[in-house]
Structure formats: structure tokens, C-alpha cells
């Protein structure tokens, strides 16, 4: 009986008479093009599913800054109220976002912070928080600044029930784009105490 002879087929050594994978010689390594394409396809599917979750995690991590800082602002305003029976009154100034609202940082603009500074305000932006209203609330952010912070508040002399204080933190997500996130926390007066509402998150 003549033993089966070794032949070459499709780049792999096989033994004649033993077709299929059982006929492969041991010790022959490597992958076929089809096998590599399957692996690449699986990796692509996994990456397409994981990347959105990773980006969402990064956004949430950045938003912790906003939640921490507006809470710090509100606590400072509450301490100011307990000491003086009123909230700090926001006044119009060249650094304000609009009349009656005090904001910081105010330069560069939020869009420039995203486009020109990788989403982070330069260190010089910390100086914008020296305005009186922020000092009254003992508020100054620490570390890197990615959000613009605004405060609008007043205590009418006619009735404490009309007291209101609004704290905002907002930023753009894209360079020059409309994608924007805002956190809003509110202080109101009722039953002899201050009440907190929020923070509430808005996207547009």
C-alpha cells in the first residue's frame, strides 16, 4: 500500500486522501485573509458600540465640575442670606452676560474656549471671579474651568416671598456648534427658610 503523498493546496500543506481541516499538517501557522477580515469586523462592531459610551462617560466626568461649582455658589448665597437676610444682588457690568446677570469667565467667549483652548478656559479666566457678587458668595472655582457660571438674584424689600436666586453653569460641546449643556439651580423663600430646586440639566 502506497502512503498518501503530501501536496500543496491553497497555501497549506495537506495530505492527499484526508480533505478538510483534519488533513492539515501540524505546525503550519498563520491566518487566511477571510479569518483576518472576520476578526477586523468583530473589532469594528465592538468599537462602534463602546466609543459612544466612552464619550458619554467623559462628558459626565466633565459635568461634575458644573454640579460641584453651582452647589458651592448656592451654599455661599445661603450663608450670605442667613447673615444679611437677603441674597447678593446681581448688577450689570461690562463683564456681565446681560443686564442684571453676573457671569464669569467672560473672556474668551465660551465658543473660543472650545475651539482655541481644547474646551478649557485659560488660567487667566480665574481673575474674572473677583467681581463683588462672587466674592459675597465666597465662590471661586478650583482647577480647570470648562463652564461659564452665571448668577441672577435679588431680594425685593416688599416681601421675602419674592426672593429668587438662579445659578447657571453652561458650556458648548462642539466648536462653534449649537450643542450646549446647561445646569440650573434655583433658591426660593418659603415657610421661613430657603428652598433649593435642582440642579436641572438642559440640552439644546
Image: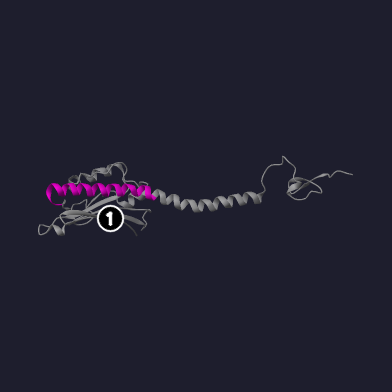
Q: Residue at x 19, y 46 (%)?
A: 137
Residue 71 included in the magenta stretch of the image = yes
Q: For the C terminus, give its image quadrant.
A: bottom left
- In the figure, is residue 181 to the left or right of 103? right
Give the image location of residue 103, x and y in percent. Answer: 23, 51
Q: Residue at x 28, y 50 (%)?
A: 148
Q: Residue furthest left?
A: 158
Residue 7 found in image quarter: top right
Q: Give the magenta range.
A: 59-86
- In the figure, is residue 156 to the left or right of 196? left
Q: Residue furthest top?
A: 27
Q: What crowding class fits label 1: few (fewer than 14 Cα within 10 Å), some (14-19), or many (20 or more)?
A: few
Residue 105 visible at all: no
Q: Main secondary structure of the magenta part?
A: helix
Give the image location of residue 144, x and y in percent. Answer: 32, 43
Q: For the N terminus, give its image quadrant.
A: top right
Colouring scheme applied when the structure was drawn: one colour
Give the image location of residue 169, x and y in percent. Answer: 28, 52
* Residue sitting nearer the eye, 114 or 146: 146
Q: What number of labels is visible? A: 1
SS class of the residue under badge 1?
A: strand
Q: Residue at x 33, y 50 (%)?
A: 112
Q: Residue furthest front?
A: 191
Residue 118 included in the magenta stretch of the image = no
- In the figure, is residue 56 to the left or right of 79? right
* Residue sitting nearer the eye, 42 or 133: 42
Residue 112 visible at all: yes
* Residue sitting nearer the eye, 23 or 129: 23
Residue 190 found in image quarter: bottom left
Give the image location of residue 29, x and y in percent. Answer: 69, 42
- Name the residue that disc number 1 marks: 198
Amino acid at each position: 500500500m502506497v502512503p498518501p503523498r503530501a501536496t500543496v493546496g491553497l497555501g497549506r500543506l495537506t495530505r492527499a486522501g484526508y480533505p478538510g481541516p483534519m488533513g492539515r499538517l501540524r505546525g503550519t501557522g498563520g491566518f487566511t485573509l477571510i479569518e483576518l477580515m472576520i476578526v477586523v469586523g468583530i473589532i469594528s462592531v465592538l468599537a462602534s458600540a463602546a466609543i459612544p459610551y466612552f464619550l458619554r462617560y467623559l462628558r459626565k466626568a466633565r459635568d461634575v465640575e458644573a454640579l460641584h461649582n453651582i452647589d458651592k455658589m448656592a451654599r455661599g448665597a445661603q450663608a450670605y442670606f442667613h447673615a444679611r437676610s437677603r441674597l447678593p444682588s446681581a448688577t450689570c457690568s461690562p463683564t456681565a452676560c446681560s443686564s442684571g446677570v453676573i457671569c464669569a469667565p467672560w473672556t474668551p467667549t465660551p465658543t473660543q474656549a472650545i475651539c482655541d483652548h481644547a474646551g478649557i478656559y485659560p488660567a487667566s479666566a480665574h481673575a474674572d471671579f473677583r467681581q463683588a457678587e462672587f466674592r459675597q458668595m465666597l465662590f471661586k472655582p478650583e482647577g480647570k474651568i470648562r463652564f461659564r457660571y452665571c448668577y441672577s438674584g435679588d431680594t425685593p424689600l416688599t416681601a421675602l416671598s419674592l426672593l429668587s436666586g438662579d445659578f447657571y453653569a453652561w458650556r458648548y460641546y462642539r466648536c462653534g456648534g449649537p450643542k450646549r449643556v446647561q445646569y440650573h439651580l434655583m433658591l426660593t423663600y418659603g415657610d421661613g427658610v430657603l428652598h433649593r430646586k435642582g440642579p436641572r440639566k438642559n440640552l439644546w
